[in-house]
Image: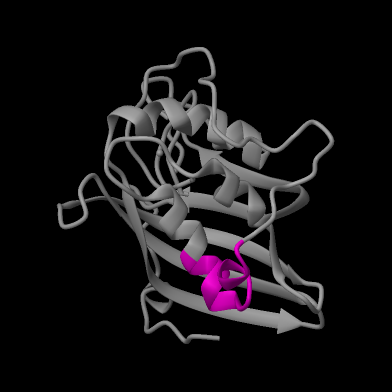
Amino acid sequence: MLRLTTVSVGLLLAGLMLEGRLPVGVAQEKKEAPATTQGATPANGTAPGANPKDVQSLDAIVAAIYDVISGPPGARDWNRFNSLFAKDARLIAVRVPKEGKPTLVVMTPASYAEHAAAYFSEHGFFERELSRKTDSYGAMTHIYTTYESRETKDGKPIDRGINSMEFFNDGQRWWCVEIYWDAERAGNPIPEKYLGETKKQ
């Protein structure tokens, strides 16, 4: 997903940065007041209705998560983004400052959208899945989905990392419950086992 730091906001993502180095991805956005977002989840926690094609399978919802945050500079479809998440879902980014120990930045889908909107309005950001490891039990599914981020669709990669995603299937559709991510960096390479071939579900 985006990283979020004092200098920027890359998502998760995709990446932005919020008070440090954080990835769902990358890039840099100046720390400003949260931007107004389109289609943020209402205060009552009710998410917009999802496109059935986005939530009909695990592959579909994972593809939708990557697709909705990707694109050239401009607004993203935050109604679509919010429609993918269960009530009380969380996005959690590992923040690694230049000095000190890693910490966590915990966001709701709505607060992620607020921080990311300003960055995306001025910067291109494209994130794609490189590989995936999947485990399921009952209605629960967990995946490690390795990502790669770029500023243009065919540009040079600017970031890689792993999104740990939790999903719930209620028998009618898939819901994203959590996205928890960390970026590749010096001393923290992506293990080869997470760079293998993706097995579609």
Colour scheme of the rendered structure: one colour
Magenta stretch holds residue 54: yes
Q: Which residues are magenta?
A: 51-63
Dominant SS of magenta comes to helix
Q: Is residue 155 above or below residue 95?
A: below
- The percent position of residue 103, horizontal first and vertical second, equals 59, 35
Residue 183 appears anywhere in the view: yes
Q: Is residue 177 above or below residue 42?
A: below
Q: Nearer the viewer, residue 5 or 100?
A: 5
- The percent position of residue 155, horizontal first and vertical second, equals 15, 52
Q: Nearer the viewer, residue 192 or 64?
A: 64
Residue 103 appears anywhere in the view: no
Tell me which residue sits at (51%, 20%) in the image. Answer: 35
Could you tell whether 63 is left or right of 105 in the image?
left
Tell me which residue sits at (42%, 65%) in the image. Answer: 146
Q: Is residue 159 above or below residue 123?
A: below
